[in-house]
Amino acid sequence: MKDLHKRVITGIVGIIALIFIMYLGINAIKVFLFVATLEAIREIYNAFMNKGIKLFLPVLFLGAILTFVCSLLNSKIEYSLIAFFIINAICSIVIESYELENSIYTFFAYFYTVFLLNLLAVSNELILIIAAFVVAFCTDTFAYFVGSTFGKHKLIERVSPNKSVEGAIGGTVIASIVTVIYFYYIGKNYIDINLSFPAVVIIILASVAGQFGDLFASKLKRYTGIKDYANILPGHGGVLDRFDSIIFVSPVIYVLFHVL
């Protein structure tokens, strides 16, 4: 009950902070994501250290800066991915102590904690960024409540024993309905939005992707032998614990940007 109390308070404070950041505009969101990726790098570095895998922090932080600059200047974010791949490969060749295995894990860490998360702001559309959080948070919230109330069948027990099939379905259905209503409201009152059938399908896929993001983060934690990535968010853990769903929702919303 104490952990739930902390989780609720942290969640409320976090939502208020996010609303304020979004109110400040798209560049404020990009700065926020940059800071979040720096913390995410620290968290995944510490997690992999438990397995004796040493990520190369200098190239990871350089990758985060390059990605942030591309995002801020509205350049193609793919440029930062290509640049990071080349720089990381060169470092693994030039630096004798930088083993190939560690360079592969370093590339994964960049792609997972930096590139995917920053796809969220590439569209420069505040409406879509809000939609990503609506999908992810609604899915998490309603999957928890539906699962705890009606859950009888385990989803993937070896990865996350507390998640149920009923919760996963309930979370996706309710989150998709809420997100469609959100887009309908925005389209009717603010800007013209083509909420086509493919767009609705992508919204559903975004919810499903968010749940797989949560499961993937759980599997990573099991692999590295940790309970939480950090403890900077009371009741939630770290940035990766809170944004694991968003990381997987982000590329789907990026696709949605080209459909709407």
Image: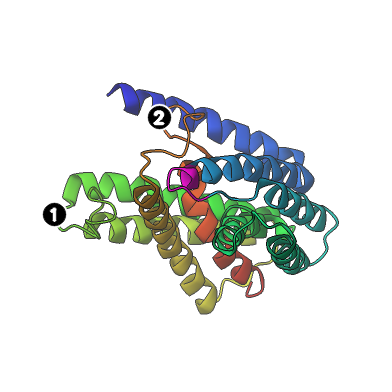
Is 50 magenta? The answer is yes
* Region rendered in magenta: 47-53
Q: Could you tell me if residue 189 is visible in this image? A: no
**Label of residue 152 in the image:** 1
**Residue at image coords 61%, 32%:** 17
In the image, residue 92 sits, relative to residue 26, either above or below, namely: below
Q: Could you tell me if residue 145 is visible in this image? A: yes
Query: Of callouts 1 and 2, which one flags the residue occurring earlier in the amino acid sequence?
Result: 1
Report the front residue among 221 and 89: 89
> Could you classify mark 1 by the number of other residues whose Cα lies within 10 Å: few (under 14), some (14-19), or many (20 or more)?
few
Q: Quadrant of the N terminus?
A: top left
Q: Position of residue 209 (x, y in %)?
A: 44, 63
Q: Position of residue 144 (x, y in %)?
A: 30, 46
Q: Which residue is mark 2?
A: 235
What amino acid type should be assigned to the residue bearing mark 2?
Gly
Q: Quadrant of the C terminus?
A: bottom right
Q: Secondary structure at mark 1?
A: loop
Question: Which quadrant would residue 213 be assigned to in this image?
Answer: bottom left
Q: Position of residue 177 (x, y in %)?
A: 42, 60
